Image (cartoon, rainbow, N blue to C red):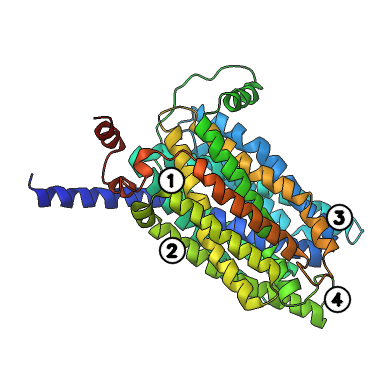
Amino acid sequence: MEEGELKHTREESTISVLLRICVYTIAFVGVQFAWSTELALTTPYFASSLNASSTLNHLVWAGGPISGFIVGPIVGIYSDGCQSRLGRRRPFLIGGLISSVLAMAVFCNSLQIGHWITSDSNVGPIIIGYISFLFMDLSINTIQGPLRALVSDLIDRKYQNMGQSVATAMQASGACLASGVIITMSNPSNPPDIEYVFTAAMVLMIFTTCITIIFSREEQHFAQTKGAFYQPFVDVGREIFKMKSEMMKLCLVQFTIWMAWFTFLPTSSSWMGEVAYGGNADAPKDSPSHDAYSDGLRFASLANIGQAVLQLLTSMVCPILVKYFGMRAVYGSSYILQGLCFVTIGLTKNRWVGLTCIGLAGISFATTNIFPFALVGDYYKSESRLGVNMGILNWFIVIPQLLDTTWTGYVSGRRMNSTFLQADGCNIFIGGLFAFTASALTLIVVVPVFFQFNYKKNWLGETDPEDILDAKDS
């Protein structure tokens, strides 16, 4: 075969792989739409429509991490050993999809359901809202782990980074769509608008997840399952006890950066409404203060669109950046940028500065969702423990979420009327310090030789990793 014919064949093969990856990852569009909607609207909805206190409003976020702490690795264990004719991962995508849709349907109608169950104007809706939010978070966690593992299962080792980059691009597309829908809402914290956006989330999640389920062809897994019903818990404990050193280092970075993210993700919209716009979620409806808060939420949605667009663009150019600078340099520098953005938000009340910083955070959000999962996919690609280790990596997302909820509400309430580091701005400032720490910790992450800048071709899937390692050994 001539050199030109070989190149042409390789380009066709790469395009074919890319199309397959898009099919495997399109479910992330719907999943991220639902998660972005949850992050943007849960705090305003509990504060404004359900009349929850500031402390309770932040403690709402504690339930999800507890469920995710259990669900992630357990789902990973069961999916690793699943012998369904549908494959190992797709049964869990189906179950997670059904439970997510049901939970979202109850959550967006929690005010009406709560009033129907009890005559108390606050207690019933808050209880229904909290329980449905807990199940919504649990269900989304059920989907995310197997979906990440599905991508790693169905693509070759040399395409792991491309796969996670495309997955992150799909996530960014979902976040962008969610922000676009929210910005059209007249009052994002009012129940009719909540119903509208969560209905859109349900429809999109069903559509995109069904595409992945239908067109992802998994083979039936025949590995023997063993032990009693509690065996998965034993297996998780054993997996943690014998965790690879490179996995430990990655989990430390993951823990630290998500300590930063969960000071920001649930609060950036309320920061815009309360600090930048000077509004108040607890003010009477149609009052100037409440209207200012609603204006701030819509403006925050514009910032979130910018963040999602930058996340999408970063995921597209990330292979090129790693090709020339190496994974470690891109990984660490993105967290430095994140730290600068978060610290700036804490120190300013200017809405345009806040919009810029929220938007720029999309760059580091892309790397947060690409590199850790690509590395775990490489560490465990040749082993039967990929699912459980994806779940364990998820622990170091949900544990920071749980820890942050224990103090962010207190700090926000204490600094509501301060003149320096006001309300949620103080939390985000502290998050910036965590981001700087995570940047330093990326120096200890074990980066496989073919993810480094001097092996440029492999990141784009043009050279087999085994060939590179053989060449290095020789």
For label 4, the residue is: 284
Image quadrant occupied by the C terminus: top left
Of the pair 167 and 33, the residue shown nearer to us: 167
The residue beneath circle 2 is 313
Which numbered disc flags the more N-terminal residue, 2 or 4? 4
Q: CA distance from mark 1 to mark 4?
A: 48 Å
Can residue 183 be seen here? no
Q: Nearer the viewer, mark 1 or mark 4?
A: 4
What's the residue type where badge 1 is placed? Answer: Ile
Q: Which residue does the numbered mark 1 point to in the structure image?
A: 214
Q: Which of the 4 image quadrants contains residue 473? A: top left
Q: Secondary structure under badge 2?
A: helix
User: Label 3, label 2: how many angstroms apart (C-alpha)?
Assistant: 43 Å
Mark 4 or 3, closer to the camera:
4
Q: CA distance from mark 1 to mark 2?
A: 28 Å
Looking at the rendered structure, the secondary structure element under dot 3 is: helix
Q: First in sequence: mark 3 or mark 2?
A: 3
Q: Badge 1: how crowded within 10 Å, few (<14), some, or many (20+)?
A: few
- Which residue shows up at 40% across the image and 59% down it? 316
